[in-house]
Image: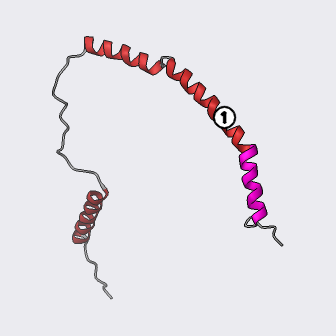
Amino acid sequence: MAKGIRSHVKKRNNVIKRATVFKPVEDSRLARLAALQVEAAKNPSVGDHMEEVSNETTSKDAMVTDEPAKISTSGPRKNSKYLRDAKLKQKKLNKKNKKKTTNKF
């Protein structure tokens, strides 16, 4: 009867397995990854070297200004509300300019 995972015996066995089987594997993996991380921190990374070289070339060639570049804030925004309103205006114009036909019978 007590075969489900809610069974006290099953829960106890899972706790024992977690402590004796999976815990040593997890600890060894964490130790190995920590050692690799320490080695990687000691080595200079490729990205840092490239940034130093690019900073040297840009400071020599480019003109340095303290003011940030201005961003244009004028002009229409092409968001969904703007597009919906434009479409609605076009529909109204088409409806107004449309000729009405009459039946001649």
Residue in the image at 56% along x and 21% along y? 39
Residue in the image at 19% along x and 46% along y? 75
- The residue tagged 1 is 29
Queried whether the magenta region covers residue 18, the answer comes back as yes
Residue in the image at 72% along x and 49% along y? 18
Q: Name the image quarter holding residue 56.
A: top left
Q: Quadrant of the N terminus?
A: bottom right
Q: Position of residue 19 (x, y in %)?
A: 71, 47
Alpha-carbon neighbours of circle 1 within 10 Å: few (<14), some, or many (≥20)?
few
Of residues 8 and 70, the one nearer the viewer is 8
Of residues 31 and 44, the one nearer the viewer is 31
Query: Which residue is situated farthest in the bottom direction here?
Result: 105
Residue in the image at 50% along x and 22% along y? 41
Q: Name the image quarter holding residue 28.
A: top right
User: What amino acid is labelled 1 in the image?
Assistant: Arg
Colour option used: secondary structure
Query: Secondary structure of the magenta portion, mostly?
Result: helix
Above or below 68: residue 105: below
Left or right of 10 in this view: 58: left
Q: Position of residue 85 (x, y in %)?
A: 25, 62
Above or below 75: residue 57: above
Q: Quadrant of the C terminus?
A: bottom left
Of residues 79 and 24, the one nearer the viewer is 24
Left or right of 24 in this view: 39: left
**Magenta region:** 8-21
